[in-house]
Each structure stands twice: as structure tokens, then as C-alpha cells.
Amino acid sequence: MNFYLLALLSGAVVAGSVAVAAWKRPVASGGRSLAFLMAAVSEWSLAAAVEAAAVSVPAKMVWSKIEYIGIASSPLLIFLFALGFSKSGIRLTIVKKVLLWTIPAATFFLAATNEFHGLIWAGFSKAPASNARLLIYRHGPFFWVHTAFSYSLMIATTVLLVRAFSRSRDIHRQQAMALLFALPWPYLGNIIYLTAGKAGSGYDYTPLGFAVAGFFLLWGIYGLHLGDLVPVARERVTQSMSESLIVLDANGRIAMLNPAARTLFAALGILPEGVPESKIAGRSSAEVCAVWPELASCLGSPSSGQKEIVWHGSARTRVFDLRLSPLCGRGDRITGWVAVLYDISRLKEAEIMAVQARGIAEALQKAGMILSSTLEIKQMSNLILDLLRHVVTFDAGAFLIAEGAELQIAGIKGIEGSQELLGGRIPVIGCGLCNLVVQQRRPLVMDRIHREDILVPLPPDFQVRSFLGAPIIFRDHVMGLLALYSHEAIGFTEDDVAVAELFAGQLAVTLQNSLLFDQMNKLATTDNLTGVLNRRRFFELGEKECERARRYKKTLALILLDIDHFKAVNDTHGHLIGDQVLRGIAAVVGRSIRASDVLCRFGGDEFLILMPETGADEALALAERLRQKISEMIIVTPAEQLLLTVSVGVAVSRDGESDCLEKMVGRADAAMYESKAGGRNKVTG
């Protein structure tokens, strides 16, 4: 008796150990059924041990009913395990599963209520004196129904395992052999129990048979990787793969992660580093990959094919190529999935860099073509920042031309109402960041700048926090710079610096050509002594003003100034003093007229002033002011101080007059001679 109790308890421990081992394996085909089977056998053995140890008959009856949890379910569970292991292609629908569980469920229910009907056991008697604590049961009719059902399942299980053994090779064949070695022992124990009948000792060896089978199952689990989806590839292929391999069962549970996948998941924070495989196997892929929703979605609803998925990490974004392939059993039935993750982040970065480089090259080429199509610096200034924005992102930008110790604002972008700042000049020394760019002659990036570091005035609500300055250098001479600002605290990258430097280098040649063009144009249109327009340019602009005055019926006035006794100045003091006189008068007149007025040196000592939309009274008033200012001028010479006067003639356009400008000049000239005839230092209109 003591030996029997010890055997039952040992069997419960062995069966429980097998159940735990099977549960922890990365199961693929019915492995969970194996865990449930051995758990049921463990419960059966334990309940049988307690029944054998119980003294009272009612207690024995209670524990006998509890045994039927394992008795009723074990045959079906071993069949379900064999069905999954053999990959027979037989698919059990929900209806079929319900039907299979009908007899085990009915058996347990009838055992629990046996005192009302006697269908499981009709009565009992005490065992011989040596086993006085055991009962010998007289089985009822439904017990034999359950027995027939159980043996049918055991026969079907044997057939499935034999077929699996015959068509498998290598380690799969060895696994099937281990299961076939385990299968006879429950048969043998149950046959001994049933054939003993009334003359028996009361010992039920069936759970002990399952316990013996448990040793073979432990050998299969630990020695032959029973329950693993890919036992051979585990050691020989998957462990050495550099790509991350994820194996799923048909229900979307993780069957295996290779070392590369575990390392990746640990690096991404999906799983703790060094987590054992037993903690991963059997868990839902959606649960494990919850922090990576895109991967969880793909694994939760797998479909064959290839897809790019993105991991948005705190440090950097990584791109992976996910390839999913089904694992098919007999009859093309899908029994699991294999997912392979390739890290293609560097490849994508290279592709992006190639696209960006191509875009930058095309933008720079386009910029070169557009900039080279115009040599006027005003037109070029309007284009520069627009073109630069195609290759560098900024919120506000300024294009500045270096003129001595000053920077002239030639272009502004991104600041509302900033056009009025164009043409303004700022001392280089007054702008710390721009001064650094000019002095160091290389690009400069500054993050988290202060408002006082910004070159141009900004609206109160316009906040910028980072700066990129790129000098425009031609033959070691700083010709200007690009000053870019961003709202972001770290708004510019090293790539932005490189692109801005390339753009500035290309711009330097264009800017040099533009400045040369401006100089040539200025030489062609201005008087090189006084800096005012020459006669040819004056008549070009004058004709346009006359045409505009005729079209819009506006008045146009003309003033002609002639320096009194200028020949005597040259003869007495020399031509250098004469040149000084001409420059002085041009400067006085230039400061006294409007921006819309046109001033030119008409002859040797004559100046013309064309005034759009000006009547006779306004023109005479201006002429008188000019005469007065010039008469107050003092020219210092080595010999003496010169006092100058001018004779002035004024003319106004007439409605419908053709050759307006020439006739106005003629009338102003006649009026000027009238002033001279009247004693000079006079205005005549």
C-alpha cells in the first residue's frame, strides 16, 4: 500500500514536470495539448493517491470523482497532441471540437452525480485485507462507453504517430519514436486494471503508466527539442543568422526568436536584455511587440509578402524590411509563420542622401543658370534667397553685400514688412555673428542665439533661435554673406552648412560679375567726375518721363543751372579747383532734390534737373533754393576762398507738345541766358 501511494505521488510529480516543461517550450503543433495532457495526468495521479490514503468511504468517493477530471480528458488530449505533432492536415472546426469533448464532459458530469443513477459505477466492495483502504468498483454502462471512446482515441493516436514516424526524417523521426515508446505504458496500466475486475487488488496502474511515459516525453522535450517549431534550424541555422528571425504558430503566438531578434528587441526596448526564451515562447506577438504597433499589426494579421516598417526611436528612426512566409503542413494547411527583419536604415539613408544630393545638384545648377541670366544686382538680389530656400530650410534670411566696413542689405526673406530695410547699411562691427563670419571667412552655425545677435530688426512676435552664416568669397575677398535664421533651437545641420557653402561659392562668381556689370553700367551712364547721370542717360530717362507725363496728363519741369564765370576759375586756379567746384555743386544739388528727380551734368559747367509731376511755381521755388545754397558755398583754394553763383533757367512742359524734352531744354536754356543778361545769380522762368 505504501509503495502504491509513493508510486502515485511520484507519477504526479513526473507528469507535472512534463507539463511545466511542455508549457515553457516554443510550441508549434499541439504542444499546448501535451502540457494540458500531463497536467491532467498529474491531477489524476494526485487525486488517486489521496483516495488511496483516505480512510472513510465518503471521502474516497469524493476523490474518486475528482480523478475523473484527468480520466475523462487524458485520452482526448493525447489525441489532440498527436494530431498537431503529425501535421496530418486534419483541421478541427469548432463544431468538431465540441463534439469531441462531448463524451469527456458527459463522463465527468455523470461521475460527479453517480449516486443518482449509477451509470459510471454501480457499486463497490473493499479490496482484500492487504489493501483494505482501496475500493473495487463495479462499473456502470456509461463507463464502458467512455472506455470504448478512449481506446478509439488511443488507437487513432497510435496511427497518427506511426504515420509521422514513417514519413519523417532525422530529428522529427526520433521525436515520433520517443512518443511511440511513451504510448504503450498507459495502455498496459489500464489493461491490467480492467482485466483484473472483481478479483483485482484495487490498484489502478493507468496513471502510473502515464508517469512512465512522462520519462520518454522528458527525453523528447529536452533531448530532441519536442515542441519546437524548427528543432534543427534552431542550432544549425537560426542561431547563426545575422537577420532577426521570428517564428509564429498558427495562432499568432511567438514560437521562437533567434539571438539576432532578441538582441534587436532588447536594443529597441521591446524586451529586456538577456530574457530567456522560456519567457517569450507562447506569448502573443501583439503583446510582445506592443511598443512597436506597426510590427505588432503585421505579425498579428500575417500575410505573405514584403513590407517596409519604421521604428520611431528617441535617438534615431530606423527602417526595416519585413518578410513574412507561411509554414505549411499537410494539404497546404498553414501551421505557422516565419518573419525575417532586415535593418535597411543605412540603405534608406544612402538613398535619401543620393536623392538629396541629386536635388541639391539640380538646384545649384538651376540657380547658376538663373543667376547667370542677369547681371543687374537688384534683380539678382531678389532671386538669391528664393533659390537658396530650395536647398536649405530657414525661417528668415538676409543677403548682404560687403562695402568696406559696412554691410548693405540687398535682400530679405521671411520677415513681413522688411522690404523697407533694403539698401540699408549696417556696420560690420555692429553685428557680432555676421562679423565673425566675415572675420573667420568660413561658415558659422550658432544654436540658441539671443535677439541682440540678429542683424535685421524683427517684429516682437517673430522669434528665431539659431543662425547659419555663409560668407561669399571671391579670390580671398569677402564680397558679402548669407545670414539665415530658424525658429528651432537647433535649426541647421552640417549638411545645411555644406550646401550653403556650395551655394555661396557659386554665388561669389555671379556677384563679382554683377558688381563689374554695375561698375561698367555706371561708367556708361554717369559722369565720372561728379557721379551724376551723363547727358545720354539723362535723355533716355527724360524721354520716358515725357511720355508718362503726356499719357497721364501730368506736368513736368526742368531746371538748367550754369556756373557764373567758371572759365575764370579754371584760368585763375587751375582745372583741379574747377573739378572741385563741379563736384561740390553736384553734391549740393543732389542733396536738395527728390529721389524721383533726375540730375545730370549737361555740359562743362551746366547741370539739368528734370522733375516729374512738378508745376512752374514748385520748380521756381526749388531753383531759388538751389541758387541761394550755391551762393553760400565756400571753395577753399591755396590762394583764396572762392564764392560761387549760378544763373538758372526754368521751363515747364506744355500739353500735347511733341519733342517735349528738347523743347523744354531749349526754353530753359533761353531763360538761363536771360538770367545771365540780367546780371547773373538769378532765376528766370
Image: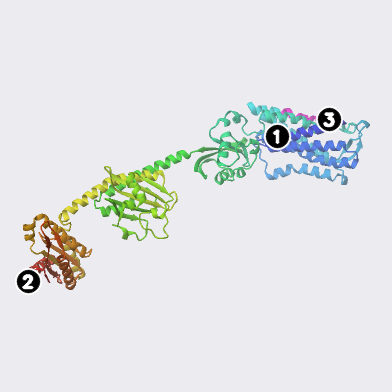
Observer-nearest residue: 612 or 107?
612
Magenta segment main secondary structure:
helix
- Where residue 678 is drawn, which disc sits there? 2
Could you tell me which secondary element the residue under label 3 belongs to? helix
Residue 109 image position (x, y, % from top left): 81, 45
Q: Which residue is drawn at 67% across and 28% down?
A: 223
Give the quarter of the figure containing the N terminus.
top right
Assess whether residue 50 is covered by the magenta stretch: no
User: How dense is the environment of label 2, judged by Cα within 10 Å: few (below 14), some, or many (20 and up)?
Assistant: few
Three-letter residue code for mark 3:
Ile
Residue where numbered disc 1 is placed: 21
On the question of residue 389 being in view, the answer is: no
Give the quarter of the figure containing the C terminus.
bottom left
Identify the image quadrant of residue 576: bottom left
The residue at the far bottom in this view is 617
Residue where numbered disc 3 is placed: 192
- Quick one: label 1 or label 2, which is nearer the N terminus? 1
Given this view, does label 3 or label 2 mark the residue nearer the observer?
A: 2
